Image (cartoon, grey):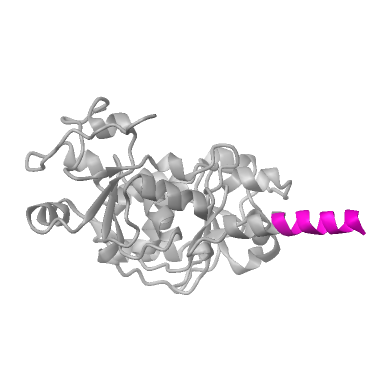
Amino acid sequence: MKRSLIVSCLTFCIMSSVSRASDYPRGELLVDAGQLSKNAADYVVLDVRSQSDYDTGHIPGALNVNVGQWSKAFEDGKDPEGWTKRIAELGISNDSSVILYDDGNAKDAARAWWLLRYWGVENAKLLNGGFAAWRSANLPLENKSPEKPAVGNFKAQPHKDRLATKQSILSSLKSSGDLQIVDARSEGEFCGTEPGANKRGGAIPGAKNLEWSELIDSNSKRFKSADELRTIFKDAGIDLDRPTAAHCQSGGRSSVMVFGMELMGAENIANYYRSWAEWGNAEDTPIAPGKPKKRA
């Protein structure tokens, strides 16, 4: 009787812990490998890894997408006709549920997720842990491409509120400054000690720095728990209730930040997609050296 009670208590504690860890305000943005395997027919599954990795083995039924080509095609988000064709050819309609995955760091999958969301695919999700999670669960793979899907009934409509621009950030800096800027780059980039190929290094004045990888558990490749993320954002001085523009170097890492903030309930989050590749090489953009984090 005593042993049974102990086991029951341990089970309750473990289940409670799991519940708290997965209690994201917008948990519907993530799908676990087990959930996907049971309900794969309900989704359009997109694999954004390289073609060679896809050919070696992928989730059954998944379609391969070249996210690099997508990124180049986006430019300034003003080609709804081209994106209507590009997205519809994947069998996607405006009401489709889409799941994206990459190798597991979420950067490429989040970029594709953000591009789809910008063009009006509202029910887009990430596979938590990506392909690494699928492999870890010993779920089946295939190495042949599925048949080309029927063209979906999709019409791209730009959601301009999801895209920050150089001008919108400059306007905020010159006026009220109400827009919270979140820099998803490394501390070295933020502080200007690692300018890369940019003409200038540093930060947008007033920006808060939180490296995108801090949101991902390095072992499981899954997003950290809700409690962990809540603490991470708070410690970085990031207010999830403020209108925000996230940026990095070229829009990928900031897509992870946008996703993570939305996962935690933030509602007014834009991606400065041209990011530092534009800001750090423009002549009319103010730059301030970012301050390194205080360390104990």
* Residue drawn 16% across the image and 43% down it: 205
Query: Where residue 108 sits in the image (x, y, percent)?
Result: 44, 45
Residue 114 figure quarter: bottom left
* Residue drawn 8% across the image and 58% down it: 175
Residue 64 seen in the figure: no
Query: Where residue 100 sits in the image (x, y, percent)?
Result: 52, 55
Q: Total label count?
A: 0
What kind of secondary structure does the magenta stretch mostly adopt?
helix
Query: Where residue 180 sits in the image (x, y, percent)?
Result: 24, 54
Residue 42 seen in the figure: yes
Magenta span of residues: 1-13
* Residue drawn 33% across the image and 38% down it: 185
Question: Would you place residue 161 above or below residue 207 in this image?
Answer: below
In-image side of 231 versus 1 (left or right): left
Q: Which quadrant holds the C terminus?
A: top left
Report the front residue among 292 and 31: 292
Give yes or no for residue 116 being in the magenta stretch.
no
